[in-house]
Amino acid sequence: MGLDVGSKTVGVAVSDLFGWTAQGIETVQIREAKNELGFDRLKELIDEYEIEKIVVGLPKNMDGSIGKRAEQSLSYGEQLETLFGLPVIYQDERLTTMQATRMLIEEGNTSRKKRKKVIDKLAAVMILQNYLDQQSK
């Protein structure tokens, strides 16, 4: 399972049974004020798709350092590991959201409002696909 962890949503992707391709599943809402971090829904998806490993996007700064957003992703991943007992791997995700946005704009028929709804899911696909590609080498 690949996750693009944002401040308001978590994009979710899973791989096919062979671990070759990533497919977007959904975007899970985060409501920090209510302490709802999407873990209940993620647990349902983990069970449904029989997930064995979680790949969390790590939004490093362009110089490779760890900033506030990356620290939040690391914290989220640690909570996932504790809650679900699954290994969590961190995948560098610099520029994936920008790439996903560019792909949707180039497609031409996706309005800004629609892009906002699918961007995190597409970024999760890119994070997981990059991980899968690295593993196959």
Image (cartoon, rainbow, N blue to C red):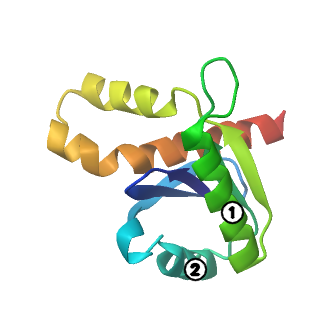
Percent across and percent down for residue 116 are: 26, 44
Query: Cα distance, mark 1 to mark 2?
Result: 19 Å
Instruction: Decide if residue 31 is in sight here.
Output: no
Mark 2 element type: helix
Q: Residue at x 76, y 52 (%)?
A: 89
Q: Is residue 125 left or right of residue 105?
A: right
Label 1: few (<14), some (14–19) or many (≥20) C-alpha neighbours in 10 Å: few
Residue at 81% over, 41% down: 135
How many residues crowd around disc 2 within 10 Å: few (fewer than 14), some, or many (20 or more)?
A: some
- Say which of marks 1 and 2 sits in front: 2
Task: Give residue 17's mark.
Answer: 1
Asked whether disc 1 touches disc 2, contact meaning CB atoms under 8 Å apart, the reply is: no
Relative height, residue 55 to residue 84 (above, below): above
Q: Where is residue 69, by image quadrant?
A: top right
**Residue 132 is drawn in which quadrant?**
top right
User: Along the horizontal axis of the image, is 101 left or right of 124?
Assistant: left
**Residue lying farthest to the top in this orientation:** 63
Q: Quadrant of the N terminus?
A: bottom right
Disc 1, SS: loop
Q: Amino acid at mark 1?
A: Leu
Left or right of 95 on screen, residue 136: right
Point out which mark residue 52 bears: none
What kind of residue is marked 2? Lys
Upstream in the sequence, badge 1 or badge 2? Answer: 1
Residue under the point 52% across and 48% down: 124
Q: Position of residue 127 (x, y in %)?
A: 59, 42
Q: Is residue 96 shown to the viewer in this render?
A: yes
* Residue at mark 2: 43
